[in-house]
Amino acid sequence: MPELDVSHSAVMARLTMSALERASRDPSCWREPTVHRALLVSGLSVLTESMRRLQHDLETMPRENISGDDSPSVG
């Protein structure tokens, strides 16, 4: 995967966590609709990127790993 994708996703995740940290210290910021929108957009961006990466991994994973034959046994 391109390095740009990795850094973009990481930045969005850090921005989301930073905004949540600030919001937890100042409850009055939740009165601002822009705070809600910013958190939703950044959170959705991280979720979308995570889903894209998961899909990519599943598509490129060798078939024998998907079948579950070599998965560790429990118990």
Image (cartoon, grey):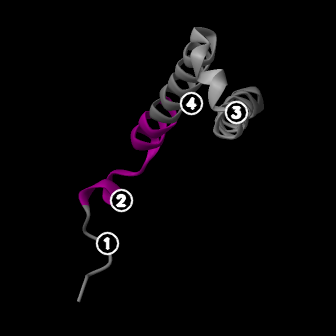
Residue at (70% x, 33% y) in the render: 26
Residue position marked by numbered label 2 in the rendering: 65
Q: CA distance from mark 1 to mark 2?
A: 7 Å
Q: CA distance from mark 4 to mark 3?
A: 24 Å
The kind of secondary structure element at disc 3 is loop
Residue position marked by numbered label 3 in the rendering: 26
Q: Determine the image quadrant of residue 42.
A: top right
Residue 6 place in picture, x, y as percent: 70, 35
The kind of secondary structure element at disc 1 is loop
Q: Amino acid at mark 4?
A: Val
The answer to whether the residues at label 1 and label 2 have Cβ atoms under 8 Å apart is: yes
Marks 4 and 3, the one that precedes in the sequence: 3
The majority secondary structure of the magenta stretch comes to helix
Residue 69 place in picture, x, y as percent: 25, 69
Span shown in magenta: 52-67
Residue position marked by numbered label 1 in the rendering: 70
Quick one: 60 or 32, which is closer to the camera? Answer: 32
Q: CA distance from mark 1 to mark 3?
A: 50 Å
Residue position marked by numbered label 4 in the rendering: 46
- Nearest to the eye among marks 1 and 3: give it: 3
- Nearest to the eye among marks 1 and 4: give it: 4
Q: Determine the image quadrant of residue 72.
A: bottom left
Marks 1 and 2, the one that precedes in the sequence: 2
Marks 1 and 4, the one that precedes in the sequence: 4
Q: Give neighbour class at mark 1: few <14, some 14-19, many 20+ (Cα, 10 Å).
A: few
Residue at (69% x, 31% y) in the render: 19
